[in-house]
Structure formats: C-alpha cells, structure tokens
C-alpha cells in the first residue's frame, strides 16, 4: 500500500489507495467496506474515507446497498455490456491507429509481443496481464482521437478489474490472446485499417468468451 503524502488532497490519496486495493483484489468483489475500519487501516479520519468512498461510488467501484457499501461485483450482463462497449471502442481505435501509428509505436508493440512470448514460457501471468494492457494502451494512443482515448480510459478501469478479479486464474487463454496480438500487430504494420479493425474485434470477442466461461465456473463452485 502506498503511503500518504502532503502533495495532493488527502481524500484523493485515500481514493487512489482504496481503488488500488480493489483492483489488486485485496478487497474482494461483493465485500463490505466499513468507513471506520478503512480509516483506521490507512490512518486517516472517517470524513476523509467517506469522501473517497463517494468518489469510488461515482466510479461504480463501490455500490450502495441499503446503508452499506459493497465492492463492485459484476454479473454476466455487466460483463457483456462492458465488453460490447470495449469491442466498439477498441475496434475503432485500431482502425484509426492503422493510419496514424508511428514507427516507434510499432516497435514498442513488437517488443511487447517478444516479452509476452517469454512471459508465456515462464507462465508469468502478472507480467502477461501488464504487457496486455500496454499493448492496448499504445493502440488507443495511436488512434490520435482524444475523445475516443477518454472513453477508453473510462471503461478501462472496469476491464482491468474484471481481468484481475475474474480472469486471474485463466492462464490457459493467454497463448491465443498473444497470437491475436501478433495478428493485430501485423495488420497495423501493413497499414491495413479494415484488417486491423477486424482482428481487434475478433480479439475482444474472444476475451468476452473467456470472461463468461470464468464467471460461469465461479458460479458453479460450491458455496463455503
């Protein structure tokens, strides 16, 4: 957990700390968060935590249920909705990137693929998840569409959350996803907007199927 500094508002720092803990799975989906306990753990006032919780609720990372706050726990429809948005946004960003991407960015993508293959060999799922995000971030940036990039950033938090909390054990899917990245990269290198759009769309659709399978597996697990 990062420490508190004096360089930014306290509630913003607490917001960032709690958000990171949610994203990293230290607070689990559906878990109740209590102001007093979080305030004591971080070492700040309840009022500061309350303001941070308001920000997290606005981000939909916390959900109000009566008088309590729960960590966002996506259901199958949530995942479908998010990935449908992601499919549209990222397919468009890939199409635009095929025209605008720079040689340096292409080289970065190539290096990510090389490192991804090595991470696959070592079964380093944390490294693979990080490289995957870098790959998609570069393509979004290469679209040069500021509004698209902003929308991508909004949905990206939930995509990362789903990946960290629901897909964390699905290492079996990584070889196919890395192969998808190779095909997307090749289409970008060939400056082919339609092919890049097609390959990105197929890639997100595959990710959606993986997410659904992982969620269904969780639902089938016996309750403790």
Image: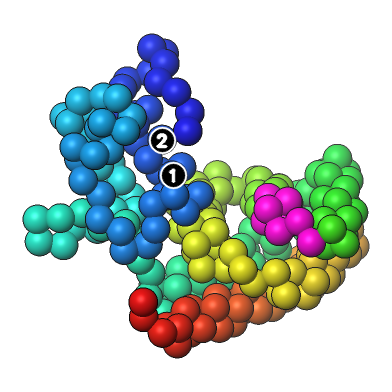
Specify the label residue 17 is tagged with: 2
Q: Is residue 181 visible?
A: yes
Query: Which element type, helix, strand or loop, lies under badge 1?
Result: helix
Residue 82 at what x, y percent from top left?
45, 68
Q: Quadrant of residue 108?
A: top right
Residue 184 at what x, y percent from top left?
80, 66
Residue 224 at what x, y percent from top left?
36, 77
Q: Quadrant of residue 65?
A: bottom left
Q: At 37% across and 62% down in the image, what residue appears?
A: 29
How many discs appear?
Answer: 2
Q: Which residue is mark 1?
A: 21
Which residues are the magenta region? 123-131
Placement of 57 over or under 98, stated as above or below: above
For the stretch drawn in magenta, the main secondary structure is: helix
Quick check: is 126 in the magenta stretch?
Answer: yes
**Image position of 182 (left or right of 213):** right
Residue 24 at what x, y percent from top left?
50, 49
Q: At 20% across and 25% down in the image, what residue appears?
A: 45
Q: Is residue 180 visible?
A: no
**Image position of 65 (left or right of 148):** left
Q: At 59% across and 48% down in the image, what residue appears?
A: 145
Within 10 Å of the Cα at label 2, are there few (<14), some (14-19), or many (20+) other Cα atoms? some
**Image position of 60 (left or right of 122):** left
Mark 1 in CB contact with mark 2 (< 8 angstroms): yes
Placement of 102 over or under 86, stated as above or below: above
């Amino acid at each position: 957990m990062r420490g508190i500094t004096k360089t930014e508002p306290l509630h913003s720092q607490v917001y960032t700390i709690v958000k990171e803990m949610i994203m990293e799975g230290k607070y689990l989906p559906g878990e109740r968060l209590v102001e007093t306990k979080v305030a004591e753990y971080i070492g700040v006032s309840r009022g500061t935590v309350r303001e941070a919780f308001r920000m997290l609720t606005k981000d939909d990372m916390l959900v109000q249920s009566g008088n309590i706050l729960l960590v966002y726990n996506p259901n199958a429809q949530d995942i479908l909705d998010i990935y449908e948005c992601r499919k549209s946004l990222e397919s468009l960003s890939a199409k635009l990137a095929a025209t605008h991407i720079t040689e340096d960015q292409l080289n970065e993508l190539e290096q990510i693929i090389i490192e991804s293959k090595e991470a696959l060999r070592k079964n380093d799922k944390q490294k693979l998840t990080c490289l995957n995000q870098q790959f998609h971030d570069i393509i979004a940036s290469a679209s040069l569409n500021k509004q698209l990039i902003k929308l991508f950033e909004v949905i990206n938090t939930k995509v990362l959350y789903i990946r960290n909390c629901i897909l964390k054990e699905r290492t079996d899917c990584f070889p196919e996803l890395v192969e998808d990245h190779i095909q997307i990269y090749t289409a970008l290198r060939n400056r082919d907007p339609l092919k890049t759009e097609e390959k990105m769309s197929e890639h997100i659709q595959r990710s959606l199927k993986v997410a659904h399978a992982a969620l269904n597996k969780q639902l089938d697990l016996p309750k403790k």
